[in-house]
Structure formats: C-alpha cells, structure tokens
Image (cartoon, helix red, strand yellow):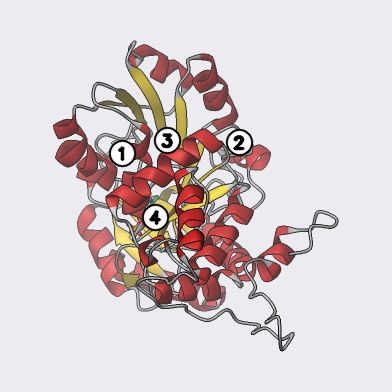
Amino acid sequence: MAASNPQHLDTLLQHTGLADFDPTTGAAPVALPSVRTSTVRFRDLDALDAAHAARAKGERVVTYGRAGMETHAALEQVFCQLEGGERAFLAPSGMAAITLAVMALLDAGDHVLIADCCYGPVRNLDSTVLRRFGVSTSYCPGTVDAFEQQRRPETRMLYVESPGSLLFEMLDLPALADYAKRNDLLLVVDNTWGSGYIYQPLALGADVSVVAGTKYVGGHSDLMLGAVVLKDAELAKRVSDNHYALGLSVSADDAWLALRGVRTLPIRMKESARNALAVCEFLASRPEVSRIYHPAWPHDPGHALWKRDCTGSNGMLAVSFKFDTDSARRFVNALRLFGIGYSWGGFESLVQLIDPSALKGHSYWPNDGQPVVRLHVGLESAEDLIADMAQALDAAAA
Ligand SMILES: *Cc1c(COP(=O)(O)O)cnc(C)c1O
C-alpha cells in the first residue's frame, strides 16, 4: 500500500492487503487467493532460526500454519486499518476474540469491571471460565461513577461495549478511557457495532478493540470470525503469545471470505443505516410503539454522544411496544421479510423478540413490562420492509 497522503477509509479498504507482484512476471492477482496450508517449509535452518527469533520478539511471522498465511495477514491489515490499530489477531469467532483479549491480559486474582450492557454470552464466559481461573467480575452501568463505586485495589480491566448490546446505549468512551488511564486499568471495548468503520475505540482512548467479524465485516452471514486489535506493542506481545498458546486458528477460506466481504463494508453499512432510519421514522409514526432504541435516531438519549464519537450508523435498532407479549409474538411471527434469528450485520433483515431475562441485568432497560423487539435492517428496499412491518402490526392487533 502506498503510504503517500492520508486517504479516506473507503479508499484504504479497497487497497489494503493486496497480493505482491511476482518478481519474475511482474503480475499479481487482484483478488488475493485463499492460501490453505497447515505448515510452511524453510529454505534452510538459518531462515527457520530467523523466523523463530522474530516470533519470540512478538513480530508477525509464520513458523507454522496455525499463525495464518498471506490471506490471514491481509485480513489483519484490514482490521488494523479499520480500527486504527498496529496489530490484529484473528480468532475463530467473536466470542473467541473476547476470550483471547480477556485471558491474555488478566491474571488470577484480578478483578474486571464489566458494563452491564455487554453482549450476553460474556456473562457465560465469566461464570464458566473466568471464575475457575480466579478472575472476579462486577457488572454495573457503563459510567465512570458506577465503575468507581465498584472499583477494588485488584481491579485491572474495564470491559465495555458501546453502543451496548440489545438496546444500543451509547457510553462516553473518552471519559471512560480517561478514568481507566488515571486508575491504571486496561480499557477493552467490544466494537462489533462500529466494526471500525463508524466508531474507533482506539482513537477514543481504548487499549483494545474486539470485533466479531461474523457481523458487518464478513457481511454475508456465511462465516464466523473475530479479531483483537490494539496499538501498544507490549500488550500486543502478550496477546500474540496467548494467541499462539491457546491455539486459536482461522480457516484460510473464512479469512478469504471476510476479505472479500469487507471490500463492500462501506456501502453495505451506509445502506443498512439509511434503511434503519427509514424504519425508525415509520415506527415513530405508529401508536403501538413506545420507544425506539437507535443512537442515530435524533430522539435517542445517546444521540449527542453518537454525533460526537461516531462517523455513521448501521442497521441495528430495538423497539418497545405498548401492547403485550402475545401481541409482540404475533407481530414477529407475521413478519415475512425479517427472518427470526440471532446475529446481524449480514445482507438480510432479522428480528428477535428479546427475552426479558436477557435484559434483567441491564440498568438501561426501563423494566416496564413492555415487550422489546430487536431488528437488524438489511439491504432490502426500505419501502418493502416498512410495508411488511405495517401488515405485521395489523396482525399483532388482530
Ligand atoms: C455476535 C457478537 C459477538 C460474538 O460474535 P460470534 O462471532 O457470534 O462469536 C460479540 N459481541 C457482539 C456485540 C456481538 O453482537
């Protein structure tokens, strides 16, 4: 990549991770192939020794296939570009990337403060794994005041997600970063929502950004992938050693699919965001709707923070209804263009009736008995999606 004048991310995303020219033919494939191999061979033992020495220093070299070849390296570059990081480590899922960040940077006896709006399965990692390894956790609202009330001498990390899972509550990341620095805490941010394209935690002061590439980066609902991205060389060395030790490996084909998907991230994300705002406008016009959760929506309480810290939005939103849960079930079942299912960030619209038990630990939730539905608004025509919602609202009333 020519590092002349700084360019827009849209441009960089098309020019990062390209194949090198063949030294004899002077030609290179435009689309980097999936380099599938379980191991590498060396010209001589000196070359192998040099590779080992470099990897011991934490450099990104290959001594064995598990570390990933050119396809993986190209995708790592893309994640660094997106997140404004120096190093990226790939994991076989977003959840595995979260596990890597947490396991690499904490020791037995450490305590972690976790924002209560985090991705639900993080609590499962906590109760299943972290506790057994002597790491303790506290959940609280994602604010400096709430964290400060729960901070202990052994607190080592702030783990947050902004906007939060399910209700998309914006956290004040620069304030949290400042608080973390003053108290010698590592700030780890799940940035799956922003995926680097519309939100950059590292630039706002976070130490580590974790992304589920399964969502917008892959973008086509056909792969599982995660990444841990950071700037600091010492932290990167720790993550690198743990990445190797834990044996996290990503299929070259999945890295290749992600690389293919991410080239169109700019247009996919913008289109989903545009459709989501159209859906918000429609929902706001309906008497059944009590509240819309979407930070780019001007009436969302997080809108000012969103405007200050984000450069765009995406297709995620939640909506609460004045009617009861049975009506909400009828609404969801009646939708024809929104698939009922988990996940998001792909080409298609998805819907999920949120189980109140998933919101129980979430202080941002008003807990008013009103059903909450989460939507991922995909790349279908907004007009069609709105017509579908209108007929489903009629069905809910029936
Ligand atoms: C989906 C998701 C993850 C986990 O990603 P997987 O690839 O499904 O393991 C983590 N964080 C957030 C915010 C997510 O939405």
Q: In the drawing, does residue 315 fall left or right of residue 158?
A: right
The residue at which mark 1 appears reads as: 103
What's the residue type where badge 2 is placed?
A: Leu
Q: In the drawing, does residue 197 fall left or right of residue 334?
A: right
What's the residue type where badge 4 is placed?
A: Glu
For marks 4 and 2 on the same chain, the one whose residue lies earlier in the sequence: 4
Task: Identify the residue shown where x is 41% and y is 14%.
Answer: 148
Q: Is 147 or 306 nearer to us in this picture?
A: 147
| Disc 3 packing (10 Å; few <14; some 14–19; many ≥20) | many
**Label 3: element kind:** strand
Gap in Å between the C-alphas at discs 3 and 1? 16 Å
| Disc 2 packing (10 Å; few <14; some 14–19; many ≥20) | some
The residue at which mark 2 appears reads as: 305
**Label 2: element kind:** helix
Estimate the x, y position of residue 373 in percent, counting from the top left.
34, 56
Gap in Å between the C-alphas at discs 1 and 4? 45 Å
Estimate the x, y position of residue 334 in percent, counting from the top left.
30, 74
